[in-house]
Image (spheres, rainbow, N blue to C red):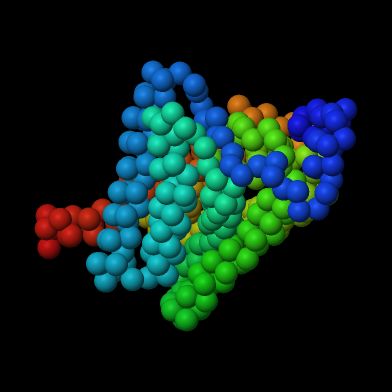
Amino acid sequence: MCQVKHRIMDSLTASTMWMIPGQNQSWVSEFILLGFSSDPTTNSFLFIVFLLIYLSSVLGNGLIIMLVCLDTQLHTPMYFFLCVLSLLDMSDVTTTMPQMLVHLLAHSQTISFIGCLMQMYVFSALGITESILFVVMAYDRYVAICYPLRYTVILNWDLCIQLVAGSWICGFFSSLFHTFFTMSLPYFGPNKVNHYFCEGPSVRSLACMDTHLIEMVDLVLSVFMIIIPISLIVTSYIHTAMAILKIKSTQGRCKAFSTSASHLTVVTFFYAPATYIYMRPNSSYSPEQDKQVSLFYAAFTPLINPVVYSLRNKDIKRAFLKVMGLKH
């Protein structure tokens, strides 16, 4: 409950301070991110674990970007989209993890109001962009399997660049609404966010007003950015699966299923926790559970993506061996 509500019976002077326009001395200027634990030993252990996750994510995704850029045989629409996905994952994990690592060791766990706003905006923008990109990647698999002879004609480079640019523009534009509506709420205290980064629902729970309308706006945005993309991906893969079953060659069917399975695995890890966080009613808000669930798309998905796409992909393995000089 907000301090405003706690102090409703305070003196007239204190009450006036909340009511007079421009009297914003008590507006929260920073937030305290509580993280996972207050125990130094536990935090030291978590620091090592998350540092390894962060470094592995950056190195893994960075390796995919490097291989796609260096190997001309990977200059195809599918690997172009994979390269963009790796860039998004690197940016996503860098938006939250470095600060969390600092807070695990530092005595102060504060983040400025502006810093919180920027982190929320960038994290949300990258997440929405990735959500749209998954639809683009599903369309890529649909065209590759259903229209293999016309693949490079339909998905020409101009269209690929337009699809990626559109994903980024939609992501960063849509995030403006989510961030603006959340951070424009009155925050007079308390300022302790029970999370390890500034995620919308966790920050919004501290607002000193009824947030029902903002939740409805967020729900509408979530329908456009989660439900509709999932529906498009499912529709795309239904047609793709039907086309795969018509392939007479066993080897051809296995290869088609392999690339599609990799994409579906990554999509599941991304959308399942995101749907739980952003599509449920605020009444079921559980800070501790939310922190654990958000780790899947904020930390584990960027880590898993390179593993899924490299272990199941002969082209990536071949490009890696070629770059390392182990294969000519």
Q: Residue at x 49, y 21 (%)?
A: 38
As drawn, is 43 to the left or to the right of 193? left
Residue lying at the far front in this picture: please name it.
13
- Is residue 203 placed above or below 314 in the rendered structure? above
As drawn, is 86 to the left or to the right of 246? left
Residue nearest the observer in this picture, 241 or 163: 163
Q: Residue at x 45, y 57 (%)?
A: 88
Q: Position of residue 291 (x, y in %)?
A: 57, 33
Q: How many marks?
A: 0
Q: Quadrant of the C terminus?
A: bottom left
As drawn, is 216 to the left or to the right of 134? right
Residue nearest the observer in this picture, 7 or 305: 7
- Choose top left, top right, bottom left or bottom right for residue 27: top right
- Is residue 229 placed above or below 13 in the rendered structure? below
Q: Quadrant of the N terminus?
A: top right
Residue nearest the observer in this picture, 49 or 34: 34
Q: Residue at x 27, y 71 (%)?
A: 72
Q: Position of residue 39 (x, y in %)?
A: 45, 18
- Choose top left, top right, bottom left or bottom right for residue 195: top right
Q: Position of residue 113 (x, y in %)?
A: 59, 47
Q: Is residue 61 visible?
A: yes
- Is residue 50 placed above or below 259 in the rendered structure? above
Q: Residue at x 64, y 35 (%)?
A: 191
Q: Position of residue 267 (x, y in %)?
A: 53, 49
- Choose top left, top right, bottom left or bottom right for residue 121: bottom right
